Amino acid sequence: MEFAAVRESMVDSLEHDTKAVVEATPVGDAMRTVPRHEFVDAEHRAYMDQSFTHRDSTVLAPSLAGRLVEALAPEPGDSVLVVGAGVGYTVAVLAEIVGARRVHAVDISRQLVHDARRNLRTTGYRDVLVDCRDGAQGLPEYAPFDRILLEAGVAEVPRALTDQLAPGGRLVAPVGRGEQRLLAIEGGEEVADFGQVGFKPLLIDGEQGGAITRNRTEREDREHAARARQRRQGWEIEWDVSNQPPRPGR
């Protein structure tokens, strides 16, 4: 398959067809450059505009990836944090725009971190930093960031992420309980609404694919219940003593 020609056709459709979700510069140019087939398991669907699942995570359709980057509005030289590295495709598009050494990405799934690192290395974006982290905590040791992108839904944007924005920086995230809206936030205020979206929620430790969930033993359950009873009795005893009438002679 001649991937360059197929990629050109894909981006043309994102720029000019009914979707019209990306501009030629810089997002369209970046998407024409990044070899998306190197980031997906099945080459035949690499340039189809559809999402699919990889390791319990969603690989975004090209139109949605382009929509996110357009909303983020990155500029060359910006320092960028991506929360939810996934397979690394959106990360690579951003690296084309701002420079690989300026892009940082985190994911809570160790398997996805390995996948993203491998994909970025084999496609020439080895200078991107990808780390296994709780996305809600960001990457404070590399802050501040000019741009922060969340590729997962949140009811509210985590405070740690807004704190890691540089002055004048921009954060883009799918926000909402129930219905999600793709929002851009600057200076703690919503500055743009890019419409309805449907992302999986931002995961906490233990929810990621392949995580080892803790199995509480029967003994631990009994001890936990006993401690709870002791705490409750302690409070009741303290209340009873404090409310007893004074003893004679006092």
Image: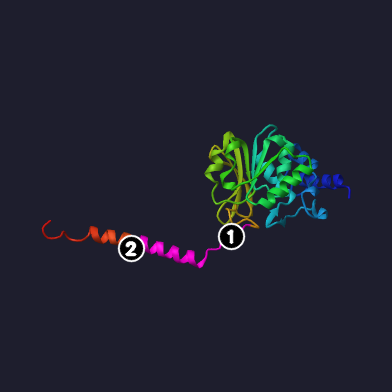
Residue 148's image quarter? top right
Residue where numbered disc 1 is placed: 213
Residue where numbered disc 2 is placed: 233
Q: Is residue 66 left or right of residue 9?
A: left
* Secondary structure under the numbered disc 2 in the rendered image: helix
Q: Is residue 74 left or right of residue 204?
A: right
Image quarter hosting the C terminus: bottom left
Residue 69 drawn at (x, y percent): 69, 42
Q: Residue at x 33, y 63 (%)?
A: 233
Q: Residue furthest left?
A: 249
Asked if residue 187 is positioned above or below residue 119 in the image, the reply reads above
Q: CA distance from mark 1 to mark 2?
A: 32 Å
- The foreground one among 150 and 88 is 88
At label 1, which amino acid type do we have? Thr
Asked if residue 207 is positioned above or below residue 76 in the image, the reply reads below
- The foreground one among 104 and 113 is 113
